[in-house]
Amino acid sequence: MDAARRHSLVVPSQLNTAVVASFTTSKPLAVLLYGIPGSGKGTLGRMLSQATAWPHISTGDLLRKHISEGTATGQASEGILSGAFAADTLVNSIVALRMREVDCRRGVILDGYPRTLEQTMVLLPILRRMNLEPVLVRLNLDYTEVRVRLQARCHCAVCGTIYNLIHLPPRLTGRCDDCDGRLIGREDDQADLLSKRIEHYLTRTAPVAQFLEASSVRVVELNATETPARLLTAILSRITTENRIEELL
Ligand SMILES: [Zn+2]
């Protein structure tokens, strides 16, 4: 078990066991997790993987594994750790390789893939060949709220004191209370990286979800502000119920 998975073990009592049990009879699905950075889809993906025994395939985790093992793929994708995005062909090949493994036959949970329309065009035929029905799971979180919070953050260029223009503003605009140093915000690497990832999600990834929806892929909408345990129960019961309905038709 890898560290990331151990990190978010689900307490069995948090789960609706009847829902989990009925899920084992579900037909093979490819759950495609969507949500802006910070929506908690990584955590949900790992919990869903535990409940279904389907592998949680995160392109971020796969790339980091290749990098730490020093493979050719890893060397070609080192920029992702500093916020760059890996080329479609590279990501397509590592996901395709992973999906050939035997544990993917009964179902998979894809996290962070497909992230672009180009990746989507490669994935859909693979799912058809594997007889996995795609289901889009979208974690909705108000991104303007995330962005406002990010933009409100700044810190002193001299002493490093952190301010928040909304919740913890300095007495004088743009100046540190403690040392009168200049306040900067954009240079904050973490905030910048997150901001870049949100921008990328909105311009490149959100259209993928729209495309899948327009292609009659089933969609499960979730409110990301719910607790992970409630989100998990909601997704399991909705997929199971909808499966049953389809079988009756
Ligand atoms: Zn200062």
Image (cartoon, rainbow, N blue to C red):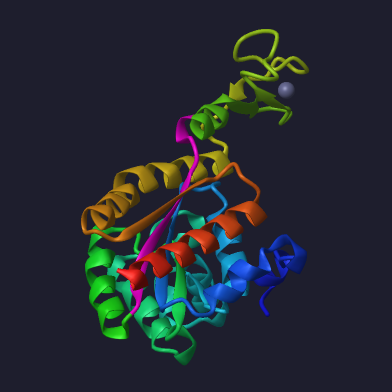
Give the magenta part as a residue range: 132-144
Looking at the rendering, the quadrant in which ligand 1 lies is top right
* Image quadrant where residue 172 sits: top right
Q: Main secondary structure of the magenta part?
A: strand
Magenta-drawn stretch contains 212:
no
Q: How many marks?
A: 0
Question: Which residue of the protein is positioned furthest toward the bottom in this rendering?
Answer: 102
Question: Which residue of the protein is positioned furthest toward the front in this rendering?
Answer: 248
Magenta-drawn stretch contains 141:
yes
Q: Which residue lies at the image location 42% right of the left edge and 86% below the top edge?
A: 105
Q: Nearer the viewer, residue 185 or 21?
A: 21
Q: Position of residue 25 (x, y in %)?
A: 50, 80
Q: Which residue lies at the image location 39% right of the left edge and 76% below the top edge?
A: 95
**Is residue 111 visible in this depiction of the protein?**
no
Q: Nearer the viewer, residue 134 or 148?
A: 134
Q: Position of residue 193 (x, y in %)?
A: 50, 45
171 to 246, vertically: above or below: above
Q: Is residue 120 left or right of residue 91?
A: left
Q: Which residue lies at the image location 57% right of the left edge and 67% below the top edge?
A: 48
Q: Which residue lies at the image location 38% right of the left edge and 42% below the top edge?
A: 199
Question: Quadrant location of the C terminus?
Answer: bottom left
Question: Quadrant location of the N terminus?
Answer: bottom right
135 to 152, vertically: above or below: below
Q: Position of residue 66 (x, y in %)?
A: 50, 78
